[in-house]
């Protein structure tokens, strides 16, 4: 079994790789090739890359020739396409770069697979941001995969394009492509550009006496669906092995959580009393969807997947990660 992972150096890529090399999931004669634009400081925790038969290559996925070369040479059986510019706020600042990485890079992957290994099973990781605002008169309910695509930020627009390319290539060329529409992932190792990790890092700094007992926040009135990254990568594994080709799957907890409630859980885990909350205008988005959470029943039914980590456990581990990282 040869597995190609794009974006292996990222938050999700490292967790997926750890999942794939764990004893309960490791395939016979498994070989992993991980590619990313920068792998200078890559490590996999307690796992030895050599012992786990993992190789790394630095590749810019917008370089069509290099993408084709690695796919032609490696000929993967499974390909997890995780690499992306995945920050909504950054996408507002850099929409052209976001589109270049997410769309052109994704199409290069699809074209490389079509040309050199059309039997390779491909998971194109997309986003729930594609759905945009849910148009319900009353309280918005959970979103299933039949909801219309209505992206409302540059990141969501770029991933919607990747989503459509994937479904069209699956039909037009018969490629075994699977699509995830992933909701918010959280957990240890996530960048502070994302809300849960941002709050956790600030609390870690406060508890270590390196920041005043004030947490700077953006919009706390939104509701989001938070899923532990370790449950998310298990879902990706289940989709690529058990899903129906050409299908999109919501990867989510199925529950909505108000951002203020998430913050309150983290504050309750702090060692510091009387933490104040202040709004930072720089953390506010030009457009911010009020409520978005998913229906994961299709994923459960088609693959047998179910989540294992509670929201509190995810936040505890995220806070613990930052307390170890900040010295």
Image (spheres, grey):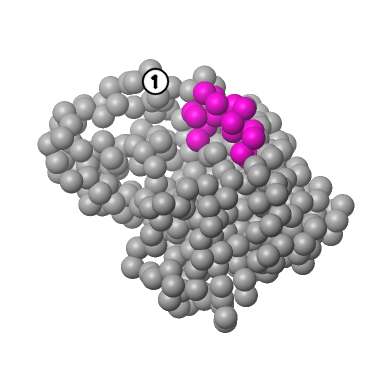
Dividing the picture into quadrants, the one containing residue 297 is: bottom right
Q: Residue at x 61, y 50 (%)?
A: 125
**In the image, residue 96 lies in the stretch drawn in magenta:** yes
Regarding mark 1 in the picture, which secondary structure is present there? helix
Q: Is residue 157 at least partly visible in the picture?
A: yes
| Residue at x 36% of width, y 38% of height | 192
Report the residue at 65% width, 42% height from top.
62
- When the figure is inspected, residue 120 is found, relative to residue 131, above or below; the finding is below
Q: Quadrant of residue 304?
A: bottom right
Q: Which residue appears farthest toward the bottom when viewing the image?
A: 28
Q: Is residue 153 visible?
A: no
Viewer-side residue, 210 vs 152? 210
Taking the image as shown, residue 152 lies to the left or right of residue 189, namely: right
At 31% across and 54% down in the image, what residue appears?
A: 317
**Is residue 43 shown left or right of residue 10?**
left
Q: Which residue is mark 1?
A: 282
286 vs 300, left or right, is left
Query: In this rendering, is residue 318 above or below 151?
Result: below
Neighbour class for label 1 at 10 Å: few (<14), some, many (≥20)?
few
Whole-percent x, y for residue 212 in the image? 16, 28
Q: Which residues are magenta?
A: 87-102
């Amino acid at each position: 079994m040869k597995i190609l992972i794009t974006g292996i150096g990222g938050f999700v890529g490292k967790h997926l790789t750890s999942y794939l090399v764990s004893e309960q999931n490791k395939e016979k004669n498994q070989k992993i090739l991980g590619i990313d634009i920068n792998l200078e400081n890559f490590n996999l925790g307690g796992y030895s890359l050599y012992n786990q038969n993992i190789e790394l290559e630095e590749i810019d996925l917008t370089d069509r020739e290099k993408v084709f070369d690695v796919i032609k040479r490696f000929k993967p059986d499974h390909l997890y396409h995780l690499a992306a510019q995945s920050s909504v706020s950054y996408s507002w600042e850099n929409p052209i770069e976001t589109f270049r990485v997410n769309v052109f890079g994704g199409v290069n992957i699809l074209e490389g697979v079509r040309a050199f290994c059309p039997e390779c099973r491909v998971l194109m990781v997309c986003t729930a941001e594609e759905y945009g605002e849910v148009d319900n008169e009353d309280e918005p309910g959970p979103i299933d995969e039949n909801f219309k695509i209505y992206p409302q930020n540059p990141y969501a627009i770029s991933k919607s394009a990747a989503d459509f390319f994937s479904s069209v290539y699956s039909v037009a060329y018969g490629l075994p492509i699977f699509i995830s529409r992933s909701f918010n992932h959280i957990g240890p190792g996530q960048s502070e550009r994302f809300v849960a990790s941002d709050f956790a890092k600030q609390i870690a700094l406060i508890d270590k006496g390196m920041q005043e007992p004030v947490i700077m926040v953006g919009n706390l009135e939104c509701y989001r669906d938070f899923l532990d990254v370790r449950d998310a990568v298990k879902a990706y594994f289940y989709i690529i092995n058990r899903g129906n080709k050409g299908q999109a799957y919501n990867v989510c907890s199925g529950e909505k959580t108000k951002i203020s409630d998430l913050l309150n859980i983290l504050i309750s885990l702090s060692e510091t009393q009387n933490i104040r909350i202040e709004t930072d205008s720089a953390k506010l988005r030009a457009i911010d969807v009020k409520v978005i959470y998913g229906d994961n029943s299709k994923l459960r039914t088609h693959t047998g997947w179910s989540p294992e980590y509670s929201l509190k456990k995810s936040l505890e581990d995220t806070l613990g990660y930052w307390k170890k990282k900040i010295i």
